Amino acid sequence: MMNGISFPAYVYLLGLLFFNSCKSDELPILGQPKLLNGQEVPHFIPDFTFVNQDSIVITNATFANNVYVADFFFTSCPSICPKVKTQMLRIHKHFQHEERLVLLSHSIDTKRDTVGRLKYYADNLGVSTPKWHFVTGSKDAIFDIADDYFNIVVDDETAPGGFDHSGRLVLVDQNRHLRSYCNGTDPEEVDRFIKDIEQLIMEN
């Protein structure tokens, strides 16, 4: 394990992040291009359908006109999740009056994190929709889409809570492109990430 990430997962994550282009005045589009109808297009978040803490169906259309920050967690996580949520709360507070930014947290414990449990968790944090969505769905859908967000999510009975996950925060633009990321447990990285969020909002 490396900071809560298994070595193979860590190597895989580095491989994904290798495709991050050099910084310029504009935030880059991150990731490997994809083939869509025979055409090469920049990496993007695929279609999804989840349910949030208020039993509302959440899809890509929910974020069509917004920049959003995504992460992966579970409510009973005994390791990195509390640190990550502390940093997400910092982002929430910093942008609480910015209507163009929304937060999206995916629960990876789809068996135990019911809609009711996610609602209780969100209420305890003092946050609510539509600013911050805590979502659940099928296990396959959550685990599969984590890859698209450059996050490692795997079952691991030897890991705290039964899951190995990376705790990475990812910034997505209104066209589903990944534009920045950071280690959600590192306040200094989150400081830089907040500046990237501000820049992306200004670009749109």
Image (tube, rainbow, N blue to C red):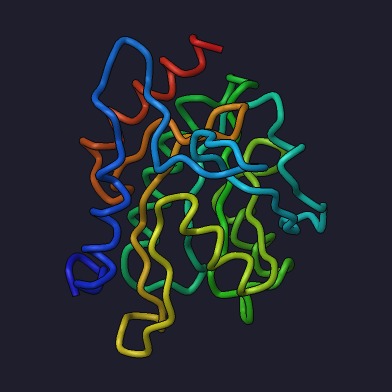
Q: Residue at x 43, y 17 (%)?
A: 198
User: Residue 182 at x, y = what percent?
Assistant: 31, 41
- Left or right: 26 with respect to 47? left
Q: Farthest residue in the bottom direction? A: 157
> For the C terminus, which image quadrant?
top right
Question: Where is residue 31, by image quadrant?
Answer: top left
Query: In front: 169, or 23?
Result: 23
Q: Nearer the viewer, residue 172 or 51?
A: 172
* Residue depicted at 72% across the width and 55% down the height: 52
Which part of the image, by quadrant, shows the N terminus? bottom left
* Residue at 21% in and 63% down: 11
Total marks placed: 0
Q: Nearer the viewer, residue 173 or 71?
A: 173
In the depicted structure, whether residue 192 falls above or below residue 2: above
Vertically, is 185 above or below 6? above
User: In the depicted view, which residue is nearer to us: 4 or 59?
Assistant: 59
Instruction: Give the answer, above or below, for where 200 lies relative to 126.
Output: above
Give the side of residue 163 with respect to residue 46, left or right: left
Q: Position of residue 95 (x, y in %)?
A: 51, 25
**Quadrant in which residue 39 is drawn:** top right
Give the residue furthest to the right: 56
| Relative image position of residue 160 (x, y in whole percent) | 33, 80
**Which residue is at a point 41% across and 77% down the rendered structure image?**
163
Return the x and y of residue 93 as percentages of the image width and height: 48, 31
